[in-house]
């Protein structure tokens, strides 16, 4: 059954599209109203009629093979529309929705026969909260009013954010969406951000969740004593306050400062300095520091129901150094999470901000981690083609060291190949992405399937085709 909210959204989109078409016809024939006067372009109605329509078609094939297991696969297709009104007195309205359909897949409702765990990658294309759902996957994604004047932009409602701690995710049919108020101010080459968020719709879901309920939609792992985490639907929080600044210190040098306050649960702060390459100097480098502290009891008075255990804090530092060489860009990256505690960030809110992040795995939930990654990017000169290659070594605490390893992930070696091509000419608007990654176990899995299925000794492939119009 289609949700009424999405019906409303698509109704608005269709109405906007039809009125926009009528506007084009009216302009061409010099249409006049019943009074014989030219239509007033300053009215609210006219600003809606002069709005823009954007469309997106997406096709996503995903397949995973695990040691001692059958291959799992899924093929999803989807379509969406977005309507954006023409600004009126510096205000404009945006609304978008998206539909997803499961064309075919292995049975995603069944637990894996060896690990008794749910599917990890293919299910993320659809609705992780209802693996049996194949057709009713529609979502009202954006619904906001935006004020923009000079250097200030303020957006209220459902929207997209891309910050170090809360971002669009990766490897899914749809991105993570947020609801709240978000402001951006630009002063010369500097940008300042601030906002309050109270709802989330994670990628891989079709529903909207209050902040407390959004934490735990995905896997919850274990407490620091090895018992199953009990924070799902047990946390108390009013929302998230997020602030940031991107400062252009000098040409090619940027400083980022971010702070995320999750009411009643935890606080995260990040400072990152990056020097980018120039024509005269092809070298670049960056350093990053992240610190986290618990707030009150970590979300619940009962210690086994907390998200952030009161006995822990976390500290992360990382860096990178690289060089551009013709069509190639090579870099060496590292991340260290100390023994103070696990680095924690709800996976429902986005991916890791680390220099060593590779699509296909997270280091969130880990403490006492050493990660090293070599990355190379090739950009063709005569074709809209990018090739990304990466090799990563990730040394984690033992899977049974629960205080440092929330999800029972062994140390591993990972390599990724990512090819992207944007079509031109007659096929302009289409783009494709082909990604393959493989992970080999380096740590002890104790020959228990729960420590390797969908984690290590596995491979995964994605083939994605998009059309934006």
Image (tube, grey):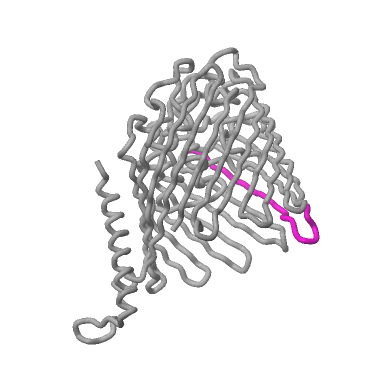
- In the rendered image, the residue lying farthest to the right is 280
Residue displayed at 28% across by 84% down: 38
Residue drawn at x 70%, y 52% is 274
Query: In what quadrant of the picture does the C terminus appear?
Result: bottom left
Is residue 302 in sight in this rendering?
Answer: no
Location of residue 339 with respect to 115 vertically, above or below: below
Query: Which region is colored magenta?
Result: 265-283
- Would you place residue 451 above or below residue 8 in this image? above
Left or right of 288 in this view: 228: left
Q: Is residue 288 left or right of residue 12?
A: right
Residue 182 position in % (x across, y down): 46, 57
Quadrant (top left, top right, bottom left, bottom right) of the N terminus: top left
Task: Pick whichever, 336 or 116, lies toward us.
Answer: 116
Count up the numbered dots.
Answer: 0
Front-lying residue, 200 or 174: 174
Q: Residue at x 37, y 36 (%)?
A: 102
Residue drawn at x 38%, y 60% is 94
User: Does residue 221 show up?
Assistant: yes
Q: Give yes or no for residue 281 being in the magenta stretch.
A: yes
Q: Position of residue 462 (x, y in %)?
A: 52, 37
> Per the image, is 88 magenta?
no
Where is 198 relative to 63, above or below?
Answer: below
Q: Which is more toward the observer, 432 or 87?
A: 432
**Residue farthest top in this picture:** 447
Viewed as shown, does residue 175 lie left or right of 279? left
The percent position of residue 273, horizontal first and vertical second, equals 69, 51
**Could you tell me residue 76's position as x and y percent?**
41, 39
Indicate the quadrant where residue 392 lies: top right
Determine the residue located farthest toward the front in the rendered image: 426
Q: Nearer the viewer, residue 408 or 137?
A: 137
């Amino acid at each position: 059954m289609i949700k009424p909210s999405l019906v409303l959204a698509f109704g608005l989109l269709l109405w906007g599209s039809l009125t926009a078409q009528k506007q084009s016809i009216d302009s061409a024939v010099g249409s006049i109203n019943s009074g014989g006067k030219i239509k007033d372009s300053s009215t609210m109605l006219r600003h809606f009629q002069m709005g823009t329509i954007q469309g997106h078609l997406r096709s996503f094939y995903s397949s995973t093979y695990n040691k001692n297991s059958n291959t799992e696969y899924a093929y999803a297709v989807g379509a969406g529309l977005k309507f954006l009104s023409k600004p009126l007195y510096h205000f404009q309205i945006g609304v978008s929705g998206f539909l997803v359909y499961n064309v075919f897949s292995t049975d995603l409702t069944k637990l894996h026969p060896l690990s008794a765990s749910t599917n990890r990658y293919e299910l993320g294309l659809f609705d992780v909260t209802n693996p049996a759902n194949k057709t009713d996957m529609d979502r009202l994604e954006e619904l906001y009013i935006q004020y923009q004047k000079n250097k200030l932009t303020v957006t209220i409602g459902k929207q997209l954010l891309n910050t170090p701690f809360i971002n669009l995710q990766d490897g899914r049919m749809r991105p993570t969406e947020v609801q709240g108020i978000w402001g951006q101010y630009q002063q010369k080459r500097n940008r300042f951000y601030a906002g309050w968020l109270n709802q989330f719709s994670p990628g891989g879901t079709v529903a909207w969740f209050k902040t407390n309920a959004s934490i735990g939609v995905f896997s919850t792992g274990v407490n620091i004593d090895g018992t199953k985490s009990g924070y799902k639907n047990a946390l108390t929080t009013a929302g998230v306050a997020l602030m940031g600044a991107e400062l252009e210190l000098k040409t090619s040098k940027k400083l980022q400062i971010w702070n995320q306050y999750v009411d009643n649960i935890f606080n995260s702060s990040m400072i990152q300095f990056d020097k980018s390459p120039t024509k005269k100097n092809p070298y670049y480098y960056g350093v990053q520091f992240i610190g986290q502290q618990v707030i009150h009891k970590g979300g619940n008075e009962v210690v086994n129901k907390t998200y952030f255990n009161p006995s822990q804090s976390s500290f992360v530092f990382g860096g990178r150094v690289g060089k551009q060489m013709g069509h190639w860009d090579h870099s060496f990256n590292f991340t260290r999470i100390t023994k103070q505690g696990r680095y924690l960030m709800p996976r429902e809110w986005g991916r890791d901000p680390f220099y060593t992040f590779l699509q296909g795995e997270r280091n969130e939930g880990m403490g006492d981690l050493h990660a090293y990654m070599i990355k190379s990017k090739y950009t063709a000169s005569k074709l809209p083609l990018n090739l990304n290659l990466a090799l990563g070594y990730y040394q984690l605490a033992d899977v049974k060291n629960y205080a440092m390893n929330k999800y029972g992930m062994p140390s591993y070696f990972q390599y990724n190949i990512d090819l992207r091509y944007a079509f031109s000419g007659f096929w302009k608007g289409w783009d494709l992405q082909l990604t393959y990654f493989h992970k080999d176990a380096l740590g002890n899995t104790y020959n228990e399937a729960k420590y390797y299925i969908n984690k290590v000794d596995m491979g995964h492939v994605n083939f994605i085709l998009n059309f934006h119009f």
